[in-house]
Image (cartoon, grey):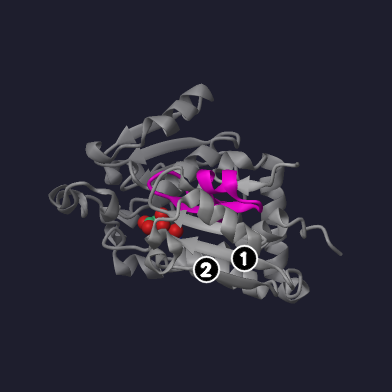
Amino acid sequence: MERKRRLIEPGDLSTGEIFHLLRLANDILADPAKYGERCKGRLLASLFYEPSTRTKFSFDAAMLRLGGQVIGFSDPNTSSAAKGETLADNARVVSCYADVIVVRHPKEGAARHIADYADCPVINAGDGGHQHPTQTLTDLMTIQKHMGRLENLTVGVCGDLKFGRTIHSLVSCLSRFPGMRFVFISPEELQMPAFVKDLLHRNDIPYEETNQLEQAIGSLDILYMTRVQRERFVSEEEYLRLKDYFILTEEKMALAKPDMIVMHPLPRVNEIQRDVDSDPRAVYFDQVKNGMYVRMALILFLLGLDKEA
Ligand code: NCD
């Protein structure tokens, strides 16, 4: 039997497929009505074993706007997981009902495990501190739109680089485009993990590490801010010590290039001051909007409905 397509990490998509998804997402954005019935009669199951507003709403809205329907849960205590059902059985059962499964889970590797047992395509909507590939598609669409290119960019990622799954996926994925350079801005305790740095070494992609946002900001084309991931800390004390390590303010923005963009996957806590929101370089709310369109494109692609007339 042909193996079902899945999106567990950006490496599951070829570069050609990524550009196809971005083109499709932009086409849907330009004329949503054209796609309003494309998923009629199809069902998406969203299994959220970990809290989410944006990502869950974004997938639900994407499927509903394609004319499909959505089932699922956002509190695992209301599913059979609470009775002790394994993820593998969960996956087998849900794929008897649904055409595509979206899963978010606090454990690294959970989405891959579900994909191994499900009989339909599975999309990873975040597995612990590991990967978040649909946020990356959202980010790529945003970068392409605001910078006009996906190459020759100096990208600063700032904050919790250890537990931030969005930037693990983003940096891994951006590393396949030409002329990328990275600046990893974090406290020493929250540095980028080895699995991402090893990938950059293997591909000869330059990066620097620093804990000085003010010194780094002037060289960046993109500043990607992240939240310190409280839920992944073993010690609350350690979280409290590090949570306000970086706060982006308008004073710091004054040191940045006039066309640098500021991104953030949201939710934000304190890491970007509210007055930065009105800076034209702040694009994080536009990022949210792009997320729905790129997920519409992904659902169509995984269901084989992207090429219909
Ligand atoms: C991110 C996540 O869940 O990893 N949020 C999101 O999906 N937009 C980032 C975060 O929670 O900090």
Residue located 41% across and 44% down the image: 108
Query: Mark 2 vs ligand 1: CB under 8 Å?
Result: no
* Amino acid on which the number 1 mark rests in the picture: Leu
For this view, does 96 lie left or right of residue 164? right
- Give whichever of 121, 188 is nearer the camera: 121
Kindly indicate the quadrant of the structure image that contains residue 3: top right
For this view, does 194 lie left or right of residue 56? left
In the rendered view, tell whether residue 277 sits above or below residue 240.
below
The residue that disc 2 covers is: 72
In the rendered view, tell whether residue 242 sits above or below residue 283.
above
Residue 302 makes an appearance in the image: yes
Kindly indicate the quadrant of the structure image that contains residue 91: bottom right
Which of the numbered marks, if any, corresponds to residue 44? 1
- SS at circle 2: strand
**Image region (quadrant) for ligand 1:** bottom left
- Give whichever of 29, 235 is nearer the camera: 235
Kindly indicate the quadrant of the structure image that contains residue 102: bottom right
Q: Is residue 296 a member of the stretch shown in magenta? A: no
Q: Look at the image and give the residue range highlighted in magenta.
A: 112-140
- Give whichever of 194, 86 is nearer the camera: 86
Say few, some or many: other residues with alpha carbon within 10 Å of mark 1 (under 14 / 14 to 19 / 20 or more): many
Which of the numbered marks, if any, corresponds to residue 285? none
Where is residue 92? Give x, y as percent: 58, 53
- Give whichever of 140, 72 is nearer the camera: 72
Circles 2 and 1, Cβ within 8 Å, touching? The answer is: yes
Where is residue 294? Give x, y as percent: 62, 60
Residue located 73% across and 75% down the image: 36
Where is residue 153? Give x, y as percent: 52, 41
